[in-house]
Image: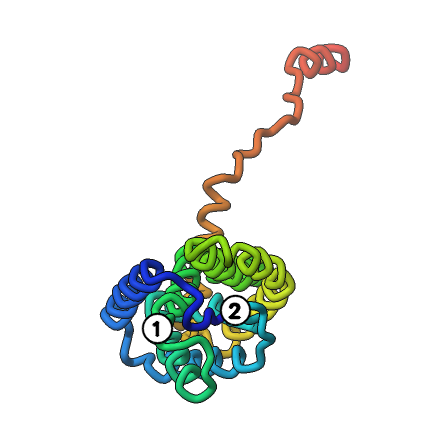
Amino acid sequence: MHIVDGALSGEVLAIGAALAAAGVGLGLKKMDYDHLPQVGVLSAAFFVASYIHLPLGFSSVHLILNGLIGLALGWAAFPALLVALILQTVFFGFGGFLVLGVNALNIALPAVIMFYLCRKGITSPVPRNAMIWGFIGGAGAVALTTLFVAGALALSGEAFWLAAKLTLIAHIPVMLVEGFVTGAAVLLLRKVKPEFLQLSEDWFEQALISDSASRSVSKPCSVSTSSPVSAPDTVSKEARHG
């Protein structure tokens, strides 16, 4: 998923760097520094997961985990992923410094988008619903990242259109794997460490109360359908016995 130096046009590099810088600035502003160790753990998780990769033209195929990072960090995913990308560039030569802004934007922006789309779903009191939304967050983040990478390549010239198409096709299995991994991780973190997903200690009780309240409002009132006692019949029976 790392685009290498020399593959993109100057205009795409400049726009990507500017947008990535804005995202990092907003992420640092919104970051809760009490959760800084969590940011470091997730940055390291991305660093390790994307270390094992297969080259694919001007990009590469590997696990990303940006969906899980986005669900847990929100806008703080920008600085977390940028640090990991810088370390990968320095130590392993992945991507490059000139394309660093575009790579950060392609991976971090889908993470933030999934945060806003799936955040409410992963707090559902029903574990199955939370896992489904976790799957959507993981797979959706990879899908958006793939589209962004393909778009960056396509905008840099017709010579990269084939590489853009290959990037889209090659990441379909990665989307499914990331979806299952993120869904399972959401279930586990809800049980053992909900604060890792920025969930309060009483989030589950609040979710249950909200869910039961919504169900009681939508539940229709039951109407009795039992037949009333016929008064004339009762009177006539008493008259015959009298």
Instruction: Kindly identify the residue that appears in the image at 76 percent across and 11 percent down.
Output: 240
Residue 49: x %, y % from top left: 54, 79
Instruction: Kindly identify the residue that appears in the image at 32 percent across and 81 percent down.
Output: 36
Residue 205 visible here: yes
Looking at the image, residue 233 lies above or below residue 41: above
Residue 167: quarter of image: bottom right
Residue 9: x %, y % from top left: 37, 61
Residue linked to disc 2: 59
Residue 98's disc is 1
Looking at the image, residue 235 lies above or below residue 217: above
Residue 125 visible here: no
Q: Residues within 10 Å of mark 1 (few under 14, many from 20)?
A: some
Instruction: Kindly identify the residue that appears in the image at 47 percent across and 81 percent down.
Output: 47
Q: Secondary structure at mark 2?
A: strand
Q: Residues within 10 Å of mark 2 (few under 14, many from 20)?
A: many
Residue 96: x %, y % from top left: 40, 77
Q: Amino acid at mark 2?
A: Ser
